[in-house]
Structure formats: C-alpha cells, structure tokens
Amino acid sequence: HGDPSMADARRITGDLLALPAGRRPSAIIATNLTSALGARSALRDAGCEVPGDVSLMAFDDHQVEDFLDPPLTTVRMPMRAMGAAAVSMLFGAVRGEGIQHLVVPEVPELVLRESTAAPSVVRVLD
C-alpha cells in the first residue's frame, strides 16, 4: 500500500485483522518505522500478540527498533551506497551522460529481533 502514514497503517492493519480467520495474515511487513508503529498500534488494540499471533517487521533500520516492545525485526538498507549511486547518476545526467543503470554493491541486511517468529500454521493464499 505504498508509504502510508501511521494512521493509514493502523487502518489497513485493522482491515487485515477483520478478515475471516483463515485469511488473516500471520505476518505484516511495513514499508518503514512509521507504518510499523501504526500496524503495532492496531495489533495491540485488537489484542494480538507480536509475534505470537502476528509477526511484524519493517524496512529501514533505526536505533529505536531495539527499544520497542518487542524489538522490531527490520531490513537494513545500504543507504549510504544507495545515496552515493543516486548522486553519481545525477552528476552523470547533468554532464549529459544520460541515465545509467547502477548496481549498489552492498545488499540489504535482515536484522532479526523479537517481533518475528515462525508461523504456527503455514498456508498458501490463492
């Protein structure tokens, strides 16, 4: 759902939790910390345990994730390398070199914390 605000993420998570029992997610992946906080708020209000009932994770990685309850699993993006690649592409475009395809040599890193767990039941949705 793009990059929703905390309120949007809260509403979207509430919609997911309103699905019939067999269709509810066992995990939610938020696009960023703000979305994860909105989702966590909806999960808490619904009485869902994280990660007991629903695992929760987000992209980006900030020092604050260690201090959430439970600490939030994240995907740490190589922001410096991505920024350097973007600046390189911008300067190339300014010099008239056109848009280049760059591959960032660093890869995202999964930072496992306590907000995720193996699902108790694995199901495939149509």
Image: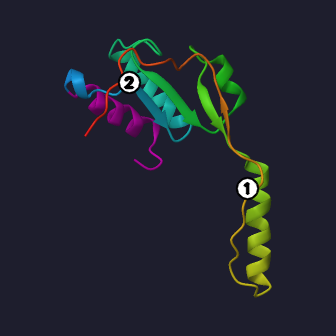
| Viewport quadrant of the C terminus | top left
Q: Looking at the picture, does residue 106 appear above or below residue 92?
A: above
Q: Nearer the viewer, residue 55 or 39?
A: 55
Residue 69 in the image, given as x and y percentages of width and height: 57, 14
Q: Is residue 87 left or right of residue 42?
A: right
Say which residue appears at 50% left-offset and 31% top-offset.
36
Q: Is residue 117 left or right of residue 10?
A: right
Q: Nearer the viewer, residue 17 or 10?
A: 17
- The residue furthest bottom is 96
Say which residue appears at 74% left-offset and 73% top-offset.
90
Q: Secondary structure at mark 1?
A: helix
**Which residue, given by chain and number where applicable, does mark 1 sit on?**
82
How far is the residue under mark 1 from the one under mark 2?
Answer: 31 Å
Q: Is residue 94 visible in the rendered structure shown here?
A: yes
Residue 31 in the image, given as x and y percentages of width and height: 52, 42
Q: Which range of residues does the magenta coloring cover? A: 1-19
At label 1, the amino acid type is Met
**Which residue, given by chain and number where applicable, does mark 2 sit on?**
26
